[in-house]
Image (tube, helix red, strand yellow):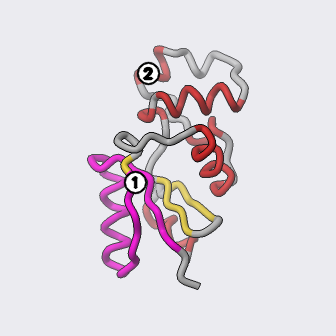
């Protein structure tokens, strides 16, 4: 069972660097997707959330200045509305998200990647 591994990440994020290093150390081939250069679509983000078994609010970086500016903690938004906001503002998405087949983990801590193997 040699399923493709994809890391959705921001290259300068320390947790993302750690996730890539862990996969490299273990000899796992993976694709790294910088979702700042290749933006997530609402459909892809929804698919990632399904694989994570989470809702958008579960991966929201609520302490980000943009989240505070948009008053996301105070607003009642539908899942679709929150997904649209997060896709438009990728700093609001927790990272890295590591996907293998039909499963994914939010690699915080990095060791959670082991759940995929």
Task: Decide whether residue 113 is among the magenta residues.
Answer: no
Q: Secondary structure at mark 2?
A: helix
Residue on which disc 2 sits? 66
Query: In front here: 51 or 72?
Result: 51
Query: In front here: 72 or 89?
Result: 89
Query: Based on the displayed image, in which of its 4 quarters is residue 80 positioned?
Result: top right
Q: How far across and how far down the image is residue 93, in percent?
A: 49, 39
Using the image, determine if residue 7 lies above or below residue 84. below
Residue on which disc 1 sits? 33
State how far apart marks 1 and 2 are (Cα). 22 Å
Would you call the spot at circle 1 few (<14 residues within 10 Å), some (14-19), or many (20 or more)? some
Q: Relative to residue 9, is residue 100 drawn left or right? A: right
At x 49%, y 67%, the residue is 113
Using the image, determine if residue 87 lies above or below residue 66. below
At x 68%, y 52%, the residue is 50
Using the image, determine if residue 48 lies above or below residue 100. above
The stretch in magenta equals 4-33
């Amino acid at each position: 069972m040699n399923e493709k591994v994809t890391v959705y990440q921001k290259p300068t994020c320390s947790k993302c660097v750690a996730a890539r290093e862990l996969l490299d150390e273990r000899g796992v081939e993976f694709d790294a997707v910088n979702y700042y250069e290749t933006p997530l679509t609402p459909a892809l983000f929804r698919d990632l959330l399904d694989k994570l078994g989470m809702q958008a609010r579960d991966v929201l970086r609520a302490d980000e200045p943009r989240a505070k500016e948009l008053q996301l903690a105070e607003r009642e938004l539908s899942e679709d509305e929150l997904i649209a906001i997060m896709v438009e503002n990728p700093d609001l998405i927790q990272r890295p998200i590591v996907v293998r087949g039909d499963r994914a983990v939010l690699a915080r801590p990095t060791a959670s990647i082991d759940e995929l193997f």
